[in-house]
Each structure stands twice: as C-alpha cells, then as structure tokens.
Amino acid sequence: MFFTFKPAHTSRCLLGALLASLSLAAPSWVRADTTLLNVSYDVTRELYKDLNPAFVAQWQKSAGEKLAIKQSNGGSTKQVQSVLAGLDADVITMNQPPDVDALVKGGLVAADWRKAFPHNATPYTTTTIFLVRKGNPKGIKDWADLLKPGVEVIIPNPKTSGNGRYTYLAAWVYGLQKSGTEAGARDYVSKLFARVPVLDGGGRGATTTFTQRDMGDVLITFENEAILIDQEVGGDKFDVVYPSVSVEASPPVAVVGKVVDKRGTRRQAEAYLNFLYTPAAQEIIARHHFRPRDESILRKYASQFPKVKTFSVEDALGGWEKAQKLHFSDGGIYDQIVTRR
C-alpha cells in the first residue's frame, strides 16, 4: 500500500550526559511541589511535549498539587542502561517489553508490571512502514523491493534501538513467510542489512540520516515517525509505503517502583500512566499518529491509519524473551549476520 547493552564506564558516561542535559531544564520545574522523570524512547519527544502539560493541568485541578514532568529521550537500550546505572526515572515509557524486563531483572520494576495498566500496560500501538523519496524512484512497494540493485536502506541499530529490533523482526518474518524456512529468513535479513550504509543508535538518528544527510533510498521506521517527517520536512520530499506485512509495536509503560518508593512519588507516577488511557490523552496520542487503544477515538482518526496486515512478536516468534535471546543476545543471529557485512 502506497501513501503520498555495555561496560559500566560507558553507562556512567551516558548517565552523566543525561543528567547534564536534564539540569538545563531546571528553571522550568524547580517551582513545582513534585517532579517526575519519564525516561522514554527516541521518537516520543513530540508526543510527551503535549501529554505532559495536559496531565500536569489535570493533576493540579484534581489533586491540588503543582507537578512538573521532566523528559528524557534516546535509543531504548541506552535509556534502560542509564536507569540501571542510576538515573532516577519515576516512570519508563519504552519501546518494547524487553526494555522493561531488563529493569525487572535489575530489581527496579515489579515482575507483574504488565498487570498494572490496561492492555498489558501498552496505551497505544504503531507499526513499521517504509518512507521513500518523493515519487518512489526505486519502485519500492514491499520487502522484496529492498533487495533491488542499488537500493540503500536506513535502519537504526537493533542492538541499541527498539525501532531497529522491530524492523529486523518484521524483515525476519517476511523472509520466513516467503521462503518457508529459517534459512530463507536468515538469507533475506542478511541481504537486507548488507544494504544498510550506517547503523544509527536510535530511530531519530536514522531519521536525520535519511532526511537531512540524504543517505539511503528508504527509511524503515514507525508509522508515526513517517507522518511527522512528512509534516515537518514537507510532503513534497517523501512518500509513505505500507508493505504487505508488518509488525505491530505495542510500546509498554511501567512505574519504576524502587525509585518512586524512595522519592515518595508512587501516587503521582501511577496517576500519570493511568492518564495515558483517558479519552483526553488518547486524543493526543491519535493526533501524534500513534494508534490509540480507545476504539471510538481510533474510529475518529481512521482515515490516517490505513489497514495493514500485522503480526505480533508473541504470535509469530514465540514472544519477546525467545526473540531477544535467539536474535539479539551476544553471539545471536543478528551478531552473526553483521559480522559478515
């Protein structure tokens, strides 16, 4: 369908950089009674710029408390490493379940975090699509076309980016369905990543490479990111292509229990994440081109969300734990593939 992980010293350095950047925002939140820190993945910057003030206003009205929310965004794996290294996130709004499960193993998040909020603690979904140059000069319509002669593909690094992992797994399932064998899937994914000239650390970095550095013929990214690019850069430069099959991404949220109990912010943190499921927040989510869970709001915005055949990691690949171990662990299939690049 066509539309117009790392060593401890590294984590400490990353944490220091994040804290330094957050401190620049101090004048805007030091007057609040309470502050929350939301550590999120790369492409939710604009979303939470609208969600955060909406919740702050609602909370002051309902609870009579002046609240401020600080925001940290980056490649999902790097964000998790920062929290494990000591960044005091009250909540995490991450890219995929393994991001949260890593914090469970670190003793920061409750093991039953999926039961804390509706839809297994995922307030919206999105899917992976293709963004091509205007007019689609390389004729890219589906996954097979990414292997045409001369086509370069921009994908963020699956080892550091949830966006990249979703892309990898979508490509794997396409190869599996097309060939009927795991060997065929490995062959397809190997050939695809041989077309990737640079592996950026996160989805936003990959976007910059494609749109500003003019590298690549196609960017594989989330639907919401592609529409944002179209709005900000200009619809005269890019087109969106929906492939025949893609992956459904259900980004999870969780309260970082160890932090909120230390800081006394559990009540605010839980209210913040529950707010994401309210009609007001679901409306904002839809306006930012993420697919809302609220069916009435999804119907309202149906024209911006074309129907696409999707699979879930749970149904197609036996779940995230299995996929993470098989494909993205040290020495896993992804490592085997990229060492031959």
Image (spheres, rainbow, N blue to C red):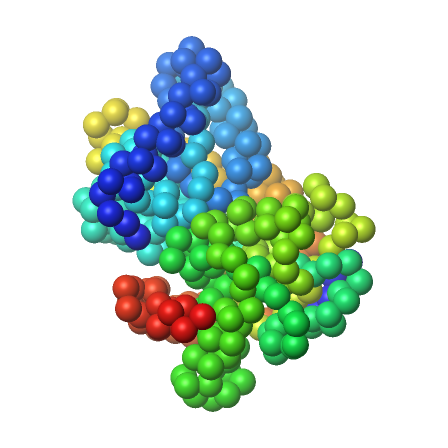
Measuring from the top left, give residue 203's x and y in whole percent: 52, 50
Up/down of 225 relative to 180, above or below? above
Q: Nearer the viewer, residue 217 or 112?
A: 217
Left/right placement of residue 252 relative to residue 103 reads: right
Quadrant in which the C terminus appears: bottom left
Residue 239 showing in the rendered view? no
Residue 157 showing in the rendered view? yes
Left/right placement of residue 299 relative to residue 161 reads: right
Up/down of 63 relative to 50, above or below? above
Q: Residue at x 48, y 16 (%)?
A: 28
Task: In the displayed orientation, state which residue is furthest to the top.
Answer: 31
Q: Residue at x 77, y 58 (%)?
A: 134
Quadrant in which the N terminus appears: bottom right
Left/right placement of residue 301 relative to residue 107 reads: right
Measuring from the top left, give residue 178's x and y in whole percent: 54, 85
Q: Tell me the quarter of the picture where residue 22 sits.
A: top left
Q: Nearer the viewer, residue 272 or 135?
A: 135
Q: Residue at x 47, y 62 (%)?
A: 166
